[in-house]
Amino acid sequence: MALDPEGGSWHSRLRRRLRARRFMVADESLVPLLHPGDKVLMDPGAYRRRAPRPGEFVVLVDPQGRVPWLIKQVVAVRGSSKEGRGDGPQVEVQGTDPSRSRDSRTFGPVPLSSVLGEAYFRYFPPARRGPLGPGSGAPDRDP
């Protein structure tokens, strides 16, 4: 079985692509990495077997209900079952610009159940097409 440069088999890449959902960035909270109008692919099955990791980008339900969903970068995951908490895992998310971002600095950590999936690839505009997440040129975060 051939492996792709990202470490997964071509079968896993094909499955991911077939279940992908498309989202358009609506705000400036992740500039300069993502701009309004950028279009990304989201994998709704990415976190069925594991929790998000710091540095990954997620699509989540807006906890304040202002818009249907948000795209943010994961900075920490807390409350795993190993920690013995009953409230379940929670994800802290942030944008790159605090002055333009509604994120965990505003609404606190969000339940893992509010995460719709991993935003893993920008497909539009073509000039900036490429993967998102750790190693993609996204700013490093200190959880």
Image (cartoon, rainbow, N blue to C red):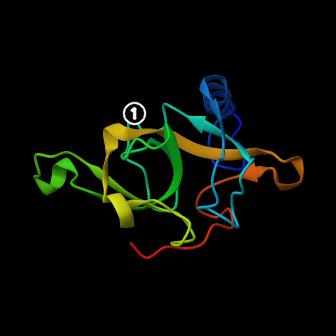
Q: Residue furthest right?
A: 127
> In the picture provided, is 85 more to the left or to the right than 102?
left
Residue 43: name its quadrant. top right
Q: Residue furthest bottom?
A: 142
Residue at which label 1 appears: 48
Q: Nearer the viewer, residue 96 or 87?
A: 96
Quarter of the image with the N terminus in it: top right
Q: Residue at x 62, y 29 (%)?
A: 21
Please provide percent x and percent y for residue 55: 51, 62
- Visible in this render: residue 57? no
Please provide percent x and percent y for residue 133: 60, 57
Quarter of the image with the C terminus in it: bottom left
> In the picture provided, is 22 more to the left or to the right than 127?
left
Tell me the SS state at disc 1: loop
Q: Residue at x 81, y 50 (%)?
A: 129
Q: Residue at x 44, y 56 (%)?
A: 53
Q: Nearer the viewer, residue 131 or 35?
A: 35
Q: How many marks?
A: 1
Please provide percent x and percent y for residue 70: 51, 46
* Amino acid found under the numbered disc labelled 1: Arg
> Does residue 86 sit above or below 108 in this rendering?
above
Q: Residue at x 10, y 46 (%)?
A: 86
Residue neighbourhood size for the residue with mark 1, other residues' Cα within 10 Å, grouped as few (<14), some (14–19), many (≥20): few
> Does residue 17 sit above or below 102 in this rendering?
above
- Visible in this render: residue 105? yes
> In the picture provided, is 74 more to the left or to the right than 78?
right
Please provide percent x and percent y for residue 88: 20, 45
